Amino acid sequence: MATANVVTPQSEDFPKWYQDVVAKAEMADNGPVRGTMVIRPYGYAIWERMVAEVDRRIKRAGAQNAYFPLFIPQSYLAKEAEHVEGFSPELAVVTVAGGEELAEPIVVRPTSETVIGEYMAKWIQSHRDLPLLLNQWANVVRWEMRPRLFLRSSEFLWQEGHTAHASAEDASAYARRIHTEVYNDFLTNVVAVPTFLGIKPPSERFAGATNTMTCEGMMKDGKALQMATSHELGQNFAKAFDIVFQSDAGESAHCYTTSWGSSTRMVGGLIMAHGDDRGLVVPPRLAPTQVIVMAVRDGDDAVDAACASIVEGLLASDVRVSLDRGRGSFGRRVTDIELKGYPLRVEVGPRDLAEGVVNLVRRDTGEKTLVPVADVVTTATALLETIQADLLAAATQRRDSQTVEVATVEEAIAAAQTGFARLAWDLVTPEIEKQLKGEALTVRCLQRADGSMPDHEKEAGLTCIIAKSY
């Protein structure tokens, strides 16, 4: 049983472990309306780090940030039939405002293809206006019947990119650039979560898309989590919203559009990919606090002075550092610090300090190293890079060891109970997909034999990843 200071072991009850970590690490709480969440300061600090890293990569890819309304006329969604059909069960609709019934119902933004399409049509006239590369950071509402904090909530935070291009080739190339240079790079090199990059089968595509690309990560319980997606929308939305440009030859043509997004679901992925029975484990490049300097005992002048000096030195080396001043029992403070998952802590105690050393403790392995005070900054900065690399290596080894090559659907069903199954895609028919769903399994993505992303699902020799998922 979990106590006030201990989380439920993963092996005992993984969902309960997840709930314990979210609560006890002070990440988030349930909101007053079912399916909503309150993101607490520490959880939001991690999200802000994610926003900064993803936004920097998006801007490097040439997109500009904008903002579009939360409220969308219902008629906008009706213009793209497949899109509205795909989102109908999740829509929140406003019918009364200002005390009066509205002439036209208003949909609370589930995604912004429709409203942005309306304005793309207004802003684009010529080939000189293309490509139009937009992104917005916003909240969206998709009414969730089985909510879980960060993973599935009725309202969540995200970024959504929307672009318009003169050709299908340019649109496809840009969507793939976002998928690899933004999402995969961020997830691999910052969150330290390796993902399988692939395309969704037609049954799992985004509503209205001609192709959906996905980053599928493996969590510690062997389930898949869709961490980010990029969509090629063809001319579907351009035709629905009359997004037309004049070519340099003076001919009129519909644009090709894309959309792509990542959300606070990545925070849930961080928790489940790296966390352990002591709580969170946050990779150094993502951590709001990379090093926490811990005074073992409060009120010791030498300890306080050493802590202040170490903090100053780490700040000067651009390390994100916090100070724990030593109030309360040492054991309780260590427990609280480990729950938060700070990558590295520096324990400064009077006995060690008298010998000219302090104790450096890695959160991921628990390894302790006595280091001369003068060497703390250089040792800590090197250790942070080591921890980052080790977390990625461990997650990659775990994913690969739990991904099984299988020859039959029956073998796939058995293997996917505890990990991923890789099966030849040509063995999977619509009837087989229904069979898989009856076993709580789905085809997460399609890949070429070498693990690269195919152009479409009809390529010869493709494999598919089958798994349980969140």
Image: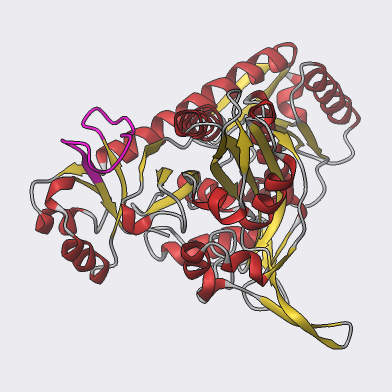
Q: Viewed as shown, does residue 244 lie left or right of 327?
A: left
The magenta stretch spans which residues? 448-464
Residue 41 colored magenta? no
Instruction: Check the image and report above or below for 240 versus 350.
Output: below
Instruction: Check the image and report above or below for 461 versus 337.
Output: above
Quadrant of res 101: bottom right
Residue 458 colored magenta? yes
- The residue closer to the viewer here, 349 or 50, is 50
Residue 279 visible, this orientation: no
Q: Position of residue 97 (x, y in %)?
A: 83, 81
Q: Viewed as shown, does residue 340 lie left or right of 269?
A: right
Instruction: Check the image and report above or below for 158 versus 37.
Output: above
Quadrant of res 215: top left
The structure residue drawn at horizontal position 52% and vertical position 21%, both measured from the top left corner, is 386
Quadrant housing the C terminus: bottom left
The structure residue drawn at horizontal position 91% and vertical position 30%, both measured from the top left corner, is 301
Instruction: Check the image and report above or below for 63 versus 418.
Output: above
Q: Position of residue 96 (x, y in %)?
A: 79, 84
Q: Position of residue 280 (x, y in %)?
A: 57, 48
- The residue closer to the viewer here, 371 or 284, is 284
